[in-house]
Image: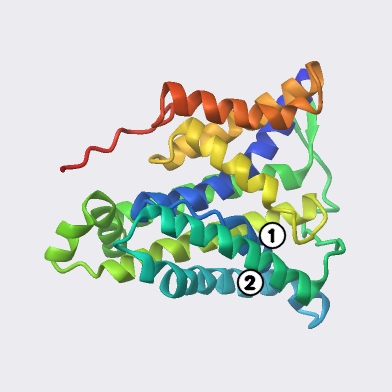
């Protein structure tokens, strides 16, 4: 029993982690929490669904094109919505992302409707994998593997590429980065594009586990943010670990206390960490000169 709960929690936590990673990439570079991230992922997933259902593309081709759309969507949001607000209060940009959240939800509802859809998975018919004698759907194993692959890919990009160097320099000190010739606008756009990619991956992995609809990412956005705060939004591995811990805790609390208390746990964890250790369990305190 407890093995099932732990493994199920790890699988759920890996989905939270993908959303948390998307948020963390943008926050690290721009200091702006993108509360439209969930709806951006939802729209990208509906694009994949349309390519599958209406145009008859194969799963991999449809998802690849949808992820390309997710990157472009992230860049477009940064250029059209966020860039004009750079230099002003961060709260203005936060409010803009909240407004964009509502706009994207309404647009998706007009295009695809508010009914639920079934989004297929290429692993849906595969036999389960047994971990310590506990059967685990192959989809869940793939979700954990994809989350790890995304973290590893972003980490390698940040450490060993010129684009990653520019992103790290911008996250440390945007003014100094601009003075040494780093194109800050491009770095911000790249961060939002990477965030859009991670969110799009989360959407196409979440949709087969849930029904695809316009509200599927709302709860995941909150849980991804809470798990990221728990682990530390300054560390991608911290985000991953924090989201896994949150997923396991939700399952255990829901099973042994009350199913309705599982969601409340998300906010309890969020409030507790912000009160006791705002930088998260594995996060680093960012020092700024004033």
Q: Which residue is mark 2?
A: 66
Q: Which residue is mark 1?
A: 204
Q: Position of residue 99 (x, y in %)?
A: 57, 62
Between 211 and 267, the one nearer to me in the picture = 267
- The disc, 1 or 2, on the residue closer to the chain's N-terminal end is 2
Q: Position of residue 250 (x, y in %)?
A: 70, 28
Between 15 and 288, the one nearer to me in the picture = 288
- Residue 56, relative to residue 186: is it above or below? below
Q: Position of residue 266 (x, y in %)?
A: 63, 31
Instruction: Please give the label number shown on residue 146.
Output: none
Residue 253 vs residue 282: left or right? right
Extreme residue toward the left, this view = 180
Provide the secondary structure element on which disc 1 rests: helix
Residue found at x 51% / y 38%:
228
Residue 132, visible in the rendered structure:
no
- How packed mark 2 is, by other alpha carbons closer than 10 Å (few <14, some 14-19, many 20 or more), is many
Determine the CA span between mark 1 and mark 2. 9 Å
Where is residue 137, by image quadrant? top right
- Residue 277, relative to residue 284: is it above or below? above
Residue 192 vs residue 205: left or right? left
Q: Position of residue 58 (x, y in %)?
A: 75, 74
Residue contact at pointers 1 and 2, CB within 8 angstroms: yes
Residue found at x 79% / y 73%:
112
């Amino acid at each position: 029993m407890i093995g099932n709960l732990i493994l199920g929690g790890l699988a759920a936590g890996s989905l939270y982690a993908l959303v948390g990673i998307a948020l963390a990439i943008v926050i690290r570079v721009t200091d702006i929490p993108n509360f439209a991230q969930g709806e951006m992922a939802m729209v990208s997933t509906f694009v994949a669904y349309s390519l599958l259902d209406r145009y008859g593309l194969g799963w991999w081709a449809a998802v690849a094109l949808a992820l390309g759309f997710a990157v472009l969507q992230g860049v477009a949001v940064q250029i059209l919505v966020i860039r004009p607000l750079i230099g002003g209060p961060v709260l203005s940009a936060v409010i803009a992302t909240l407004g964009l959240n509502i706009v994207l939800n309404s647009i998706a509802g007009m295009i695809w409707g508010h009914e639920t859809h079934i989004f297929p998975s290429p692993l849906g018919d595969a036999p389960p994998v047994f971990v310590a004698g506990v059967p685990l759907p192959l989809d869940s194993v793939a979700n954990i593997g994809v989350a790890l692959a995304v973290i590893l890919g972003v980490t390698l990009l940040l450490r060993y590429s010129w684009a990653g160097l520019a992103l790290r320099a911008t996250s440390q000190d945007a003014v100094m980065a601009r003075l040494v010739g780093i194109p800050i606008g491009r770095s911000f756009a790249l961060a939002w594009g990477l965030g859009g990619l991670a969110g799009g991956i989360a959407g196409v992995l979440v949709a087969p586990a849930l029904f695809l609809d316009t509200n599927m990412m709302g709860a995941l956005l909150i849980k991804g943010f809470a798990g990221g705060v728990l682990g530390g939004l300054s560390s991608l591995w911290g985000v991953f670990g924090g989201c896994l811990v949150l997923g396991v805790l939700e399952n255990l609390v829901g099973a042994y206390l009350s199913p309705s208390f599982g969601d409340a746990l998300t906010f309890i964890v969020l409030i507790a960490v912000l009160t006791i250790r705002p930088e998260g369990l594995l996060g680093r305190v960012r020092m700024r000169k004033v």
